[in-house]
Image (cartoon, rainbow, N blue to C red):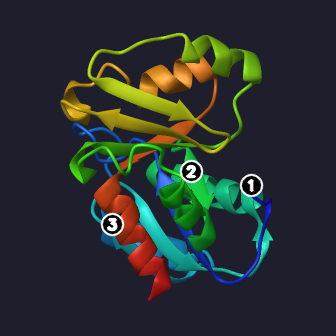
Amino acid sequence: MESIIMGNTHIALLRGINVSGQKKIKMADLRQILEENGLKNVKTYIQSGNIIFDSEPVDRSALQEKIAIIIRQQFGFDVPTLVLRKNDVEHILKANPFHEEAEENKLYYVLLKSTPKEVLVEQFNQLQFEHEGFKITDTCVYLFCKGGYGKAKLNNNLIENKLKVEATTRNHKTMLKLLELVSD
């Protein structure tokens, strides 16, 4: 993914908000606070921290940091934030190695904030998970969870711990909806 984001429309993915009563953020409050801090046309999709917004072209890491700081100042906790563009989501969806063989409700995307070290990827690739498949790229760990994500041993926390990167997970339906929203 390029580090300078050109154009106006962006997607921000927040990790771990509104999950099991933790890090509660009302989406209406989040939209208002982000707009008060210079983001434009802020929309959210469901309660798990999917934000579509417009902003001037800027360095991706600066935009991620800006959103994380706003959340820390307004809500009092840290939330890892990943910013993507439409072409990032298109590429991630198109490159899914499990798309042909799996039902869409079994597909998940662990979106990586940074590229994991090759030695850690090699070690991770040695692991096996019953009823679960995975493929690691520089920007995403593709998951195929035959029993669904809720029962999967291969999850966001494990991937973050083993690959030593921040990540956030979205299901296939959410990724398609984000692409639709950013295309409007």
Residue pictured at 37% horizontal, 23% vertical: 154
Q: In this figure, which residue is indicated by the disc labeled 2?
A: 81
Label 2: state its secondary structure. Answer: strand
- Decide if residue 150 is on the left or right side of residue 91: left
Task: Count the numbered circles shown.
Answer: 3
- Decide if residue 140 is on the left or right side of residue 115: left
Q: In this figure, which residue is indicated by the disc labeled 1?
A: 61
Give above or below for 95 relative to 80.
below
Whole-number angstrom distance, CA of label 1 to CA of label 3: 23 Å
Query: Residue furthest toward the front?
Result: 100
Q: Point out the image quarter for the C terminus.
A: bottom left
Give above or below for 20 relative to 125.
below
Q: In this figure, which residue is indicated by the disc labeled 3?
A: 27
Image position, residue 168 (x, y; %): 47, 42
| Disc 1 and disc 2 in contact, CB within 8 angstroms | no
Amino acid type of the residue tagged 3 in the rendering: Met
Image position, residue 70 (x, y; %): 58, 59
Q: Point out the image quarter for the N terminus.
A: bottom right
Label 3: state its secondary structure. Answer: helix
